[in-house]
Image (cartoon, rainbow, N blue to C red):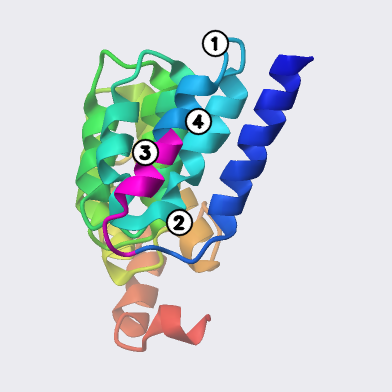
């Protein structure tokens, strides 16, 4: 019973932090508080640990050192909480760090796939080249997640990258690229020809396509 009350109290404190204004500057007191929450959590509360770490997104730059530590933690849930926070926070260094997590073959595959999804969730053009390298990479289990993430980045660079793959990769990769293009643009069908996509994009890329769809 005492453990249940402790977990509820910590989740309540984390929720309060989640509702607090975004903190762009360093906040050592907040980081110390988060550390104490994590230390107080019982080992049998992995899901709660994930929730608290994920809410570090509200701490701004102050959370960066703790998130880096969380990525190296042995607990799966601590790692996934950090990845989820990195997918939503305003850290310019987040995309390269998430790509590093995705490339780390020592990690659990689910964590690596979640890191790719987090890059897509950020929606930044800076993530396109990283995702492109995984979509064309040697690990088949990461290819589809990379394509799905590309399909979330509403930037012209993502369309260009997917068309680049479609041009160079007949077969399954081309079909997967078309599926991501449908998800990204809402145009055509995944069975549409490469020529149709190329013709459409030659016109739309000069027409602020994504701004028109807002």
Q: If you read the primary sequence from the N terminus, does the residue marked by circle 2 or circle 1 appear first?
A: 1
| Mark 1 secondary-structure assignment | loop
- Identify whether 144 is placed above or below 42: below
Label 2, on which residue?
Answer: 152
Q: If you read the primary sequence from the N terminus, does the residue marked by circle 4 or circle 2 appear first?
A: 4
- Judge whether residue 91 can be spotted in this image: yes
Residue 194: in magenta span: no
Determine crowd level at label 3: few under 14, some 14-19, many 20+ residues with C-alpha closer than 10 A. few
| Residue 210 point in image, percent of width and height | 43, 78
- Judge whether residue 145 can be spotted in this image: no
Determine crowd level at label 1: few under 14, some 14-19, many 20+ residues with C-alpha closer than 10 A. few
Q: Which mark is residue 37?
A: 4
Q: Which mark is residue 32?
A: 3
Q: Which mark is residue 43?
A: 1
Q: For the view shown, which residue lies furthest in the right direction? A: 1
Residue at left offset 34%, top offset 69% = 155
Please report the bounds of the magenta region as a residue range: 24-34
Residue mark closest to the camera, 2 vs 1: 1
- Identify whether 53 is placed above or below 160: above
| Mark 3 secondary-structure assignment | helix
Residue mark closest to the camera, 2 vs 3: 3
Residue at left offset 43%, top offset 15% = 75
Q: If you read the primary sequence from the N terminus, does the residue marked by circle 1 or circle 4 appear first?
A: 4
Is residue 182 rendered to the left or right of residue 31? right
| Residue 6 point in image, percent of width and height | 67, 25
| Mark 2 secondary-structure assignment | loop
Dominant SS type (magenta)? helix
Q: CA distance from mark 1 to mark 4?
A: 12 Å
Are dots 1 and 4 in contact, CB under 8 Å? no
């Amino acid at each position: 019973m005492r453990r249940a009350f402790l977990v509820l109290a910590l989740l309540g404190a984390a929720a309060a932090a989640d509702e607090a204004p975004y903190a762009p500057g360093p906040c050592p007191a907040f980081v110390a508080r988060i550390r104490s929450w994590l230390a107080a959590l019982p080992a049998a509360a992995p899901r709660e640990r994930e929730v608290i770490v994920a809410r570090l997104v509200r701490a701004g730059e102050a959370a960066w050192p703790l998130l880096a530590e969380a990525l190296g933690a042995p607990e799966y849930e601590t790692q996934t909480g950090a990845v989820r926070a990195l997918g939503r926070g305003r850290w310019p260094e987040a995309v390269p760090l998430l790509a590093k997590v995705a490339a780390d073959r020592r990690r659990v595959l689910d964590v690596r796939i979640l890191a790719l999804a987090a890059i897509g969730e950020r929606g930044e053009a800076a993530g396109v080249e990283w995702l492109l390298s995984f979509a064309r990479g040697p690990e088949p289990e990461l290819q589809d997640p990379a394509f799905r993430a590309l399909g979330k980045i509403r930037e012209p660079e993502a369309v260009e990258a997917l068309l680049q793959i479609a041009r160079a990769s007949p077969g399954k990769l081309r079909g997967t690229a078309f599926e991501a293009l449908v998800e990204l643009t809402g145009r055509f069908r995944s069975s549409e020809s490469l020529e149709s996509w190329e013709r459409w994009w030659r016109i739309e890329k000069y027409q602020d396509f994504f701004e028109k769809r807002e």
